[in-house]
Amino acid sequence: MTDPQLGLLMLGLIVAAIMLGFPTAFTLMGLGIVFGYMTLGDHIFDLMVQRAYGVMTNDVLISIPLFVFMGYIVERANIIDRLFRSLQLAAGNLPGSLAVATIVTCAIFATATGIIGAVVTLMGLLALPAMLRAGYDVRLSAGAITAGGCLGILIPPSILLILYGATAGVSVVKLYAGALLPGIMLAVLYVLYVIARASLNPSLAPKLPAAERDVPARQVAMMVLTSVVPIALLIAAVLGTIIFGLATPTEAAAVGSLGGLLLAAAYRQLNLQRLKESVFLTARTSAMVCWLFVGSSMFAATFALLGGQQLIEQWVLGLNLTPTQFLLLSQAIIFLLGWPLEWTEIIVIFMPIFLPLLSHFNVDPLFFGLLVALNLQTAFLSPPVAMAAFYLKGVAPPHVTLMQIFRGMMPFMLIQVFAMLMLYLWPQIGLWLPNKLYGN
């Protein structure tokens, strides 16, 4: 068996091993060492040390534990409970008001955390019982929660964009600026869809009883002021300083972590137990990401040494694809990979395969990253392996079936496909802001 064939065998084995449930990071590292030993002998261990050191000195990755800590401390401070209640009252007269409040809360929460499982789980506990009590259709309720919860994949401070930036060598600042408008566009499309469905068929989302909606405007304004404004200021402090170049992502993440602590303290929700839980979860998540990057770096180096990367490039170039055909092929592959694999595995394993081909097809890595983020968000809502559905099922009442959740997600998945089409046809949706702020 030739070296390039060994590389392809290595690629097939890692996919099979992950699907069988083996730990991703250590499987990547183990396969990299075993196959690398066949080529380099004992020198593979020197390469392993160099790769591990290179990952540990990557400044971009320092922001991940800080953003993750900010997300966990905001989640555990019950800030989102206040936010949902106030938005529920503020949107009381809109068709499908509870679903609209759910999506807006998810968008704000995603901007403050970027942790998909946390957003879907918490909103499943808060919003789903409220919508079911109000007589909402189970499928519409589930779709609003899962789709809104997945906005954190795209909306900054997305951990996915940080990992893509570190993998592709693209500025995280530009990625955040580029993802902002597509993320807002997607949230607006969700809200418009819910309002349209509730207007055409009010039985899907009945209006709340007048007694629940009849709250003095002054009281509603005060609730919104005390719940929305503080977290909006936190988000503005983090994203604003990044996008306008006032701070690096790491510096802004540190400010966000401090702001999350102060916000939790201001709401009298900060105690030693919540702080310990947030620190523990942050350490666990950060260690997972760190080892995943070390393993993927080792795997990618061995794959390249075996000639697997060159073989794939020759095959793709031999197809004589146009840039449009290449984008369609690459996004179709990424979408299919999103069924059996997590987005972290797709970014660290398969992005290094696609990235060298971008220059040949004259594709902007920034634009490609935005398409990938939207695509993986779509895969998160695509049965049969839609992780958002399983997060929600874990906290949903027993009578809510997985099939109902899947059916509820489908219209929102089609909206995401429509958003991808819009981004492809009008790239300036994602490129206008970074070009305006930082130049081409």
Image: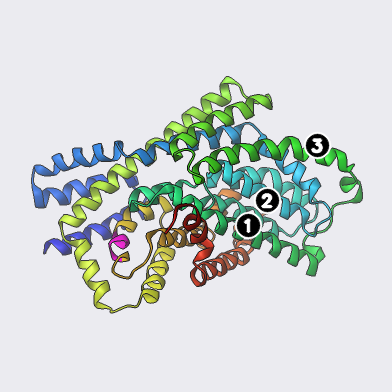
In magenta stretch: residue 47: no
* Span shown in magenta: 353-357
Q: Which residue is mark 2?
A: 104
Q: Quadrant of residue 352?
A: bottom left
Residue for point 56% across, 66% down: 419
In this rendering, the count of numbered labels is: 3
Residue for point 24% across, 77% down: 318
Nearer-N-terminus badge (3/2): 2
Q: Which residue is mark 1?
A: 187
In three-dimensional space, the C-alpha distance between marks 1 and 3, rounded to whole angstroms, equals: 25 Å
SS class, disc 2: helix
Q: Which residue is mark 3?
A: 222
Nearer-N-terminus badge (1/3): 1
Kindly check if marks 2 and 1 are in contact, taking CB atoms under 8 A apart as contact.
yes
Residue type, label 1: Ala
- 376 relative position to 232: left or right: left
- Whether 100 is drawn above or below 76: the answer is below
In magenta stretch: residue 356: yes
> Residue 64: x percent and y percent?
43, 39
